[in-house]
Amino acid sequence: MTKLKTLIFFLSIALMFGAISAGVGNAQTSNNIQTFAEDFHSYANPQAVSVTNVDLDWNVLFDQKMIKGTATLSVARNSIDKTAPLVLDTRDLKIEKAETSVDGKTFKKTTFKLGAADKFLGTPLTVQLPPDAKFVRIAYATSPTASGLQWLAPEQTAGKKMPFMFSQAQAIHARSFIPLQDSPQIRVTYSARVRTPKNLLAVMSAEGNSQNSARGGDYKFKMTRPIPPYLIAIAVGDLQFQSLGRRTGVYTEPSMIEKSAFELADTEKMVEATEKIYGAYRWGRYDLLVLPPSFPFGGMENPLLTFATPTILAGDKSLVSLVAHELAHSWSGNLVTNATWRDFWLNEGFTTYLERRIIEAVYGVNRREMEAVLGRRSLEQELFGMETRDQILHVDLKGRDPDEGFTGVPYEKGALFLRHLEETVGREKFDKFVREYFDNFAFQSITTETFVDYLNKNLIAQNPQISLTDVSEWIEKAGLPKNAPQPQSDAFAKVEAQTSRWLKNEITASGIAAKDWTTQEWLHFLTKLPANIGAERMLELDKTFSLTKSGNSEIAFQWLLMGIKNDYAAADSRLEEFLTTIGRRKFVKPLYEELAKTSAGKKRADTIYAKARAGYHPITRASVDTILKREASR
């Protein structure tokens, strides 16, 4: 019996007697003893010693592709054993020295030991602590191939004149540039002093970012709210800032600032809309950093400074649901965080649900439903070829890279589960529940078991139409339950009618009334076409709508995927251009996977990848290396 099923069983018994017991979450106290969930993706020993604050002193060395400096960790003993060492997570770090201190001023050298390296987890660093030690200072340097950093040459940037560096710490890549306890349940505050070349601007997921883009080569930052380590983030480059509202703005390279500001103009409206439903935004400012196209994800919700891919810059605000998603993380993920990576759906399911609510508030219910339909269809397609074990929300990732959990399941299945709860009890009750959930667990990291306990006491107990059995099926079983919501879109119904007429040759491509179609309608059209539509029919569409030349990354991706499946040679050069200029894993991974299905496609993939690999982020490289059976990149 799984832990969750065991919890549900006892909760059911307790409910019968009217005495629901409290669930166990991370960093919660019982009888003054701090408790932590078991995290299979960290070597840390927080039950004995935990890190509470990180002070960074860094030199960013572009010529050596490394960060060199110190990390001073504030530590707290959580057990009566005063001889327990501090165990940290590292990956490919060169540890030069370890010191301890009682007062944070006078440090004395101590012994340390690096353990055996694991291909997923990196290497444990064990530091001996005197009984009264409260601070540990580690002098170290990162590897030029650190999995959480990417170093870009000037020619790989928009401006082509200055280098660029940025971090990506989720899921367990923070340990590749900071020696720390890299578990999402071990929340820390942090500060940083960062020295860079004087012509470059440094920004971080903290207070201290320059809104006048002043550059001096010496920057100071401070995050006063406790965050999981994967939210520590830095970028250094030729950056410019433009305001979007009283507490929102965008950073990017100067040549991209105008386009970015136009596309992201509704950010302030999104913050205000979210606050009306889910309570105050608690992080001060909400700024975005539009990165070079090698960024491996759509966005990363680093507090105060969301990192975003330039592939969302479609020119018509049609792809800004990504901004709504990353903003939603300010409540679901950053404020209330998954305690371990098997609880990842608590971050992404809530966030995808909130994203759709934000889109509805700002752009209307029709836009929300179109995106929900596309989300469910994408999930269904992914589930079709997915192992049963990965179709579960409370996924078991023991012995695996937590990046393997970054599928559509925690996002879309999680969102459907929450929508199911909303539709069952009504929006007013569910909004109240979610808002109180954020308040109750603010700045905490929790497990799925803790969530189920809270759900049971605060929603199910008052609404018997929801059962714990139903909840268990959603969270612990593969696939989609029969009661999964079915989003509907009238606009899509009209697209389908025209699609059917074209496929039956009742109209030509020029007869398809697509002039005013939104991105979402185009995606619906393309994903509803037969997989084996054939090159001849693709050519007809291309001559009419110039889809091969589309500047919309989502439309281009779907079209190029169709091109591979149907041997559409006319899109071949665009495919190479796309794969050699964009490193977003959402696009890159499926295209290489489709190419690799045939010997000719595999040969083509190898040729393109040889040109593209150096420009990809280590996370993207690791994915494509696996697909093309190359030596692992980390």
Image: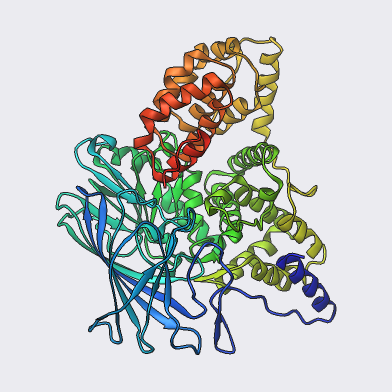
The answer to which of 403 and 373 lies nearer the viewer is 403
Label tally: 0
Q: Position of residue 425 (x, y in %)?
A: 75, 60
Q: Quadrant of residue 238?
A: top left
The answer to which of 436 and 398 lies nearer the viewer is 398
In the rendered image of this protein, does residue 253 appear above or below residue 590? below
Q: Position of residue 142 (x, y in %)?
A: 30, 57
Residue located at (43% from left, 47% from top) = 266
Residue located at (82% from left, 62% from top) = 465
In the rendered image of this protein, does residue 511 appear above or below residue 98? above
Position of the N terminus, as image quadrant, is bottom right
Q: Is residue 346 left or right of residue 426?
A: left
Q: Position of residue 155 (x, y in %)?
A: 25, 34
The answer to which of 406 and 503 lies nearer the viewer is 406
Q: Position of residue 629 (x, y in %)?
A: 50, 35
Q: Quadrant of residue 520?
A: top right
Residue located at (65% from left, 71% from top) = 450
Residue 319 can be seen in this image: no
Q: Is residue 195 left or right of residue 442?
A: left
Q: Quadrant of residue 438?
A: bottom right
Residue 59 can be seen in this image: yes
The answer to which of 148 and 290 lies nearer the viewer is 148
Q: Is residue 106 left or right of residue 549?
A: left
What's the coloring here?
rainbow
- Outermost residue to the right: 16
In the rendered image of this protein, does residue 468 appear above or below residue 388? below
Q: Is residue 181 left or right of residue 599?
A: left
Residue located at (73% from left, 50% from top) = 478
